[in-house]
Image (cartoon, grey):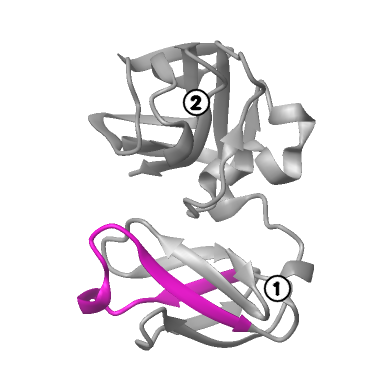
Amino acid sequence: MRKGNDIYLHVLKSENGRIELPALPAEIKSASLLNGGKVEFSQKDGKLSIIIPQTTLEPVDTIVKLEVDRPAMKIPVVTHVSGIKSTASNVYKGQNEEYGPQQAFDNDPQTRWATDSSTKQCWIAADLGKATTIQSVRIQEAADYADRVTKFEFQYRDGGEWKTIFSGTKIGTKFHKKFTPVTAREFRVNILDATDGPTIAGIELSE
């Protein structure tokens, strides 16, 4: 979320309060929690590092306010968050900047990957840039469009073949699944059936 010269980051999960993101193309003047608490930050070598005191982390959504040196809406959208390159089989009316797959990986529940109406089958994939061991995934359908997905599978790419780690039915707004660790570079949510065009607000892969 952006307003004036402020950018609001929604941190849905952090084990130790340390967050690493791509550097912003702007100077950060200050960083603080929405309630005014202190947040440490540094921006160098193409990375933005944020340290939130563990005692101030919220159980669901910790909001960090970044004040930058220019109107936040004029800052280009960062589409590859935490090194993730995202792709999808369908994007709502082709509007990639607003509803593209990168919106599902930006740690902001107010943005979303959306698909065209009446879409029943589609997929969204993450390329982590290198082989990474993953053993947990969180998936969040956008609240206003929840429970559209009725059948899906979570997969990883092995050479030229997608292999299924687990299958499921409903996703909803709080889906979380742990599984036997899998090491791969690419993972995807493959939606096999839905009542209407699936809309995903967040996907979080954890080591």
Q: In which quarter of the image is residue 125?
A: top right
The range drawn in magenta is 47-67
Return the x and y of residue 98 as percentages of the image width and height.
Answer: 70, 45
Residue kind at label 2, given as amino acid type: Arg
Residue 93 is left or right of residue 51, and the answer is right
Query: Mark 2 = which residue?
Result: 188
Q: In front: 147, or 45?
A: 147
Return the x and y of residue 120 as percentages of the image width and height.
Answer: 55, 11
Vertical arrangement, residue 200 with respect to residue 162, above or below: below
Return the x and y of residue 15 as percentages of the image width and height.
Answer: 26, 61
Q: In front: 110, or 144?
A: 144
Query: Mark 1 = which residue?
Result: 72
Determine the CA span between mark 2 and mark 1.
Answer: 31 Å
Vertical arrangement, residue 174 with respect to residue 93, above or below: below
Return the x and y of residue 34 as percentages of the image width and height.
Answer: 41, 78
- Element at label 2: strand
